[in-house]
Structures are given as C-alpha cells and as structure tokens.
C-alpha cells in the first residue's frame, strides 16, 4: 500500500542518489586520467571498436539525412523562390544541430550499448574482480580508455556525418532537382561561420562523446552480475544517453549562442 | 597416506578469521565466525550452497569486507589497510575464479602476462619465459595466441591457474575449481593443486562441493554451517560427535576416508 | 586483425575525421589563416536593412571581400567596416550601396569605382554611400503618390 506521496519522494531520492553515483564515477574516471601508466594500446583498441566500426553507419546515415534535407528543403524553399539558399539550409541545420545530435544518438545506439554490454559482462564473469585481485584498477584499465575514446571519436564522426550529409544534399539538389552546384556550395559557404557554427558543432560533439562515454561505462560497471543485469544495463544506457544528449543539446545551444 | 598434519612440525596460521559478522539486509551470512587456514597446507571450505564459501574466500582477497570482525592475511590485518596496503597483500595472493575470469579480449599469453607487465620491470623476453614456464606447469601447450572464448572449460581453468601463480604467490585461492568439469579434468586440476602445494609449498585454500577431491587434497576442512565455521582434519570431522557433521561428509565420505587412511587408492 | 593493422586503420580513421573537420572549418566555415583580405575601409549608412557581418562585398558582381562589423557611430548612423582584397585600387570617390540579391536573397555591399585619380587608403572611409531600400517607405510612397525619400 504505497503512499503515492512517499513513493514520489522515494523515487526522487533514488534519482538523486543515482545522479550522485554517476557524478562520483565520472570524477573517478577523470582522476584516473592523470594516473600513469598511459594505456595507449587499450585506448587505440577502443577507438577502433567505437570509431572505425561506426564509420559505415555514420557515413550512410549522414548521406541519407542530407538527401532528405535537400529534398524537403528544396520543396519548401522553391515556394518562395529561395531555392538558391538550399546549401545554406542544409549546411546550417546539419552543422549546428543534426550533425552532432544525430551522430550522438547513432553512436549511443551502436557503440554505447556495446560498451555497456561488454563491461556488464565483465562484471558478471568476475573479470573486474580478477583485475582487482591483481591490483589493477578496473576503472583505469577498462572504463577510462573507453570513455576517452568515445570523447575523441565523437567529433570526428560528427564531422564525417556532416560532410556526407552535405554531399547527400548536393546530390539531391544538384543532380536530381537541377540546382546549380556552385550556387549550392556558395550559399553553404557564405552562411556558415567558423566560430559560431563549426566550433559550436565540434564542441557539442565532444561533450556528447564524454556524456555517452561516462554513461555507458557507468551502466556497465554498476550492472547486476547476471545476464538480466547486462541486458538492463544496455537498454538503460541507450535511453539515458539519448535523453541526456537531447537535453544538453538545448543547454549548449543556448549558452554557445550567448 | 592420509593428508594430516605432521604433529612435530609447528605450523603457523597464514589466514585468520576472528569474530566475523556479515549480513545482506535482513539475511545473516556470518555470525561470530572464526577459523584459520594454516601455512603450506591445503584447506577446503565446504558447506551448502549459499553458506558463504565464496564470500569467505573473497574476504581473504579484500574483495568483500565484513560488517564486523578481524581478518589477518600473512600477518597483515586487512581492515586497517588502504588501497596501496591492500595491493601489497594481494601481491602475495593468487586467485583462481570459478570461470577463470580471464579478460575476453586478450590472448591467453597476454592474460597470463598481465600481472607481470603491470607490476614488474621484467623485459618482454623475461616475461615470455615466465609465462611459458607457468603454462607448461599447468600442462597447457600451444594456446598462447588463443582467446579465452576458444578454450574448453578445463583448459580455461588451467590457464587462469597459470595467471594466478605467475607472480609466485604464497597463498593460492581457488573458487570452486572443480565445478563443471568432467572427471579427467577434475583429476588434472586436483593433481596440479596438490603438486603446487607439495612442491612449491603454496598455501592452498579451496572452496568445493566435490567430496572426494576435498577429502583427498585437504589437510583441513572448514565446514560452514549455521553462519559459523567448524574446522578440523577430515578424520576429526568424520568421527565428530555431531551427527550433522558426519552426515555432511556422508556415509560414502566416511567410508572413503577409511580407504584413504588404510592406503587404498581412489576409484 | 593484427594489432599493427588495427593501428593503421585507426590512423586512417582519425585522418578521415580530421579532414572532415578541416573541410568544414576552412572551406565551409571560412576560417582562414591570414584573414579574409587585409584591406579595411569603413562606410556609413542611414539604413543598413538586413545587412549582416560576413555579407559579401562585390565589385561588378565579383566578390572581393566581406563585411567585418556593423556598429553605430556617434551620429547614430550605421558604421560598416569592410575587409577587401589588398590588391584593389579604388578611387577616393568610390561609392558603396546596399543591394539585395534576388527578391528575397541576402543583402550585400556593391562598390562602384569613381573617377578620381587619388586612391583610397587602408582604414579610410568611403564618402558616398547608398542605404538599403526600405520596402515599406517604397510601398507607402507608391500608394500615397509622394516622392520616395532616399539619400
């Protein structure tokens, strides 16, 4: 017979302590960043798993999104006789928002879930305990390389996504809909500002990368040591990281524009 | 020949548990538990599932802390230690986990080499020699470049054993080393552990359900029951006044002990 | 895959990513090492309309630079700073007017060379300017039949 008010209170406290745990975990990871030894090999492995293996997904999705933007943009702009601005429309929406956000969501689904699953499995099979018994810090050995790799990889993938999308818009606008290629690119180049748009875009991607990196490693690390726990860790990573990306997108956009 | 202690030799205690209390929520695990494991002897922790055998083992390695009580490992009191102090104690321990707990993404060679690469300043060549020596000692050949996922249960366990002994620990902890293995592999592991104890003087502490191996290997048995521990040599427990203890060994166990002490071989 | 092969692939991936970032920054974003042009002039207008910084500066239809900044001067008129190619030789009576590209397009500044022999120097201001067309005034003038106010 749960009193609804105390239930809300309990849930709130649970959420707050959950948030506290993630923050403590994040600071633990950050502290480990400055402890030797530097694990280049493991970080490179993580960059391979998270970045290289995501490129095909990112490039094809980028192209598709750019193509759709090109199509939608064109049909709307043509009504106002402003179809020459298609490059600007496609470019700005991608660079400012769609590039980092969609890349963040895609990478969360692909790489974030795999990190959570991998670490969760390591918890369940006592691999992390094995590391502890060998006096190897599991956060330093397992979580840090993955979180670091995710932070480094996200801006690169976001840029690849954006370039492929611009190309997708180009193909649709120029080849299919008859826009002039030079106009497309010129409109794109004159409307995009390096400082406001491109730097903001990269900054967003870096922040998203760090967020997904921490959330996915944390969920894996704190999962229950059984198969159900691993599966819960995986799904909760995708949900939490996706929502966090979308919310923080608003805050970063608001603050960066100031 | 039965595996009982030599009366004239003084054996010091290597691991001591004193007044240990532990509970998970409302469930008591240990209530005023006390026992000791002697140096250079094989001690087998036995008990029903859920009695806390693995928990006790993990406490030795500092992976689990009791709510109250004192644990002493190789002369060091664990509860006073911080992380660096605990690391020093762990250097003298080697632990074999139930499913090996080798890192999935690394080869067997890299797994066994890990403690050396992390802690020692040996060259790669010296590490390679040490790794191969240990793999040899556990009877594994040609598996260096395989991943843990590619090994069978028995081989995986032996590879994990190689990792556990690679830094020449004083105390070897094994969590259910026989579980899930077929009889030939059980024999292999038992022979390895016995040899490590006899030849290298390792203190071996094992948790097990496997009655026959426990009786053969164990110098002393620690029976976890009613949230406490009862220790004794296999013979002491077999002739105990407490019928429950004798029942735990079972009629087969008692009979088996008789065959061991009369010099018979196991079937 | 061998770890040396993996290293190579990671290297290629990072190169790819950095090239994408470079393309977006330099080509699309217009970030440049030495700045757009180097030759600065100012022009003051009563009305700049929808002119924004980085709008193109054009001579005879060819882009020669861009608008760097727009501020109010002491007389509360719009002071626009232009940055153009340093090799341009413009007479001191060059005029600057704000035009619209197409009907709904972006606004830009068109420079028309004058006839004087003396050339304008770096940092000087243009005397002849033509403000942006105010659409409301134009329509109002048309409706009421009065003269269009321009300068």
Image: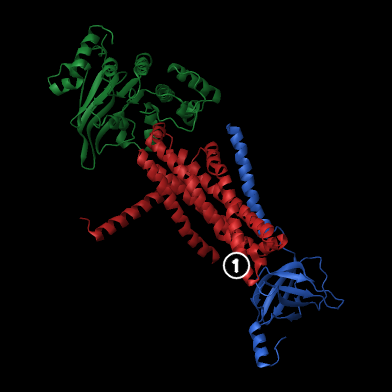
Chain colours: A red, B green, C blue
Identify the secondary structure beneath mark 1. Answer: helix
Q: Badge 1, how many Cα within 10 Å: few under 14, some, many 20+?
A: few
A129, above or below B232, in the image: below
Residue at the top extreme? Answer: B263
Indicate the quadrant containing the C terminus of chain B: top left, top right, bottom left or bottom right. Answer: top left
C61, above or below B170, in the image: below
The residue identified by callout 1 is A76
B1, above or below C37, in the image: above
- Residue B66: image quadrant is top left
Viewer-proximal residue among A87 and B126: A87
Indicate the quadrant containing the N terminus of chain B: top left, top right, bottom left or bottom right. Answer: top left
Query: Is A166 displayed left or right of A126 in the figure?
Result: right
How many marks the image carries: the answer is 1
**Residue B36 on image: x %, y %:** 25, 25
**Residue A21 on image: x %, y %:** 37, 49
**Residue B135 on image: x %, y %:** 46, 20
Residue that appears at 49% across and 62% down: A250
Residue that appears at 37% across and 34% down: B86
**Residue B157 on image: x %, y %:** 40, 24
């Amino acid at each position: 017979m749960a009193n609804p008010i105390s239930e809300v209170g309990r849930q709130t406290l649970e959420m707050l302590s959950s948030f506290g745990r993630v923050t403590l975990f994040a600071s633990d990871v950050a502290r480990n960043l400055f402890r030797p030894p530097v694990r280049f090999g493991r970080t490179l492995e993580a960059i391979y798993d998270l970045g290289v293996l995501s490129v095909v997904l990112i490039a094809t999705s980028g192209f598709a999104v750019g193509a759709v933007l090109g199509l939608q943009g064109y049909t709307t702009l043509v009504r106002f006789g402003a179809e020459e601005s298609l490059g600007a429309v496609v470019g700005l929406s991608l660079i400012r928002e769609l590039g980092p956000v969609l890349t963040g969501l895609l990478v969360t689904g692909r790489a974030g879930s795999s990190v959570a699953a991998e670490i969760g499995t390591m918890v369940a099979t006592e691999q992390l305990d094995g590391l502890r018994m060998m006096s190897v810090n599991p956060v330093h050995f397992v979580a840090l390389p993955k979180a670091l790799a995710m932070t480094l990889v996200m801006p690169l993938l976001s840029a690849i996504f954006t370039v492929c999308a611009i190309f997708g818009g180009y193909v649709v606008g120029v080849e299919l809909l008859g826009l002039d290629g030079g106009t497309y690119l010129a409109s794109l180049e004159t409307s995009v500002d390096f400082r406001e748009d491109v730097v903001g875009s990269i900054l967003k991607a870096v922040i998203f990368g760090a967020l997904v990196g921490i959330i996915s490693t944390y969920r894996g690390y704190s999962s229950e040591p059984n198969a159900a726990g691993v599966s819960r860790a995986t799904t909760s990573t995708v949900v939490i990281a996706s929502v966090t990306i979308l919310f923080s997108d608003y805050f970063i956009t608001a603050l960066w524009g100031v | 020949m039965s595996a009982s202690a030599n009366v004239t030799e003084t054996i010091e205690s290597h691991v001591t548990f004193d007044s240990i209390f532990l509970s998970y929520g409302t469930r008591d695990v240990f209530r005023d538990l006390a026992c000791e494991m002697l140096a250079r002897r094989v001690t087998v922790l036995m008990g029903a599932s859920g009695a806390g055998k693995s928990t006790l083992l993990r406490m030795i390695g500092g992976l689990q802390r009791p709510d109250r009580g004192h644990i002493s490992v190789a002369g060091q009191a664990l509860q006073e230690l911080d992380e660096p102090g605990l690391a020093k104690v762990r250097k003298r321990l080697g632990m074999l986990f139930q499913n090996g707990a080798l890192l999935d993404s690394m080869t067997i060679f890299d797994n066994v080499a890990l403690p050396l690469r992390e802690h020692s300043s040996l060259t790669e060549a010296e590490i390679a020699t040490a790794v191969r020596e240990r793999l040899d000692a556990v009877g594994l050949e040609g598996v260096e470049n395989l991943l843990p996922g590619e090994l069978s249960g028995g081989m995986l366990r032996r590879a994990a054993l190689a990792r556990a002994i690679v830094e020449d620990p004083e105390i070897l902890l094994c969590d259910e080393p026989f579980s899930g293995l077929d009889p030939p592999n059980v024999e292999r592991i038992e022979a390895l552990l016995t040899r490590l104890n006899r030849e290298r003087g390792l203190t071996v502490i094992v948790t097990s359900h496997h009655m026959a191996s426990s009786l053969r290997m164990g110098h002393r048995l620690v029976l976890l029951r009613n949230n406490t521990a009862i220790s004794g040599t296999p013979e002491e427990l077999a002739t105990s006044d407490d019928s429950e203890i004798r029942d735990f060994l079972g009629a087969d166990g008692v009979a088996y002990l008789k065959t061991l002490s009369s010099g018979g071989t196991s079937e | 895959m061998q770890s040396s092969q993996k290293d190579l692939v990671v290297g290629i991936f990072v190169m790819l990513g950095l090239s994408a970032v470079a393309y977006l920054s330099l080509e699309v974003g217009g970030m440049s090492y030495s700045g757009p042009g180097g030759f600065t002039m100012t022009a003051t207008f009563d009305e700049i309309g929808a002119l924004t910084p980085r709008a193109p500066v054009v001579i005879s239809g060819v882009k020669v630079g861009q608008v760097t900044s727009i501020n109010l001067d002491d007389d509360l008129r719009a002071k626009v700073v232009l940055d153009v190619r340093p090799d341009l030789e413009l007479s001191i009576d060059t005029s600057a007017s704000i035009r619209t590209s197409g009907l709904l397009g972006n606004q830009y500044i068109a420079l028309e060379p004058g006839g004087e022999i003396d050339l304008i120097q770096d940092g000087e201001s243009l005397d002849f300017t033509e403000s942006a067309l105010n659409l409301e005034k134009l329509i109002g003038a048309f409706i009421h039949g009065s003269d269009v106010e321009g300068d």
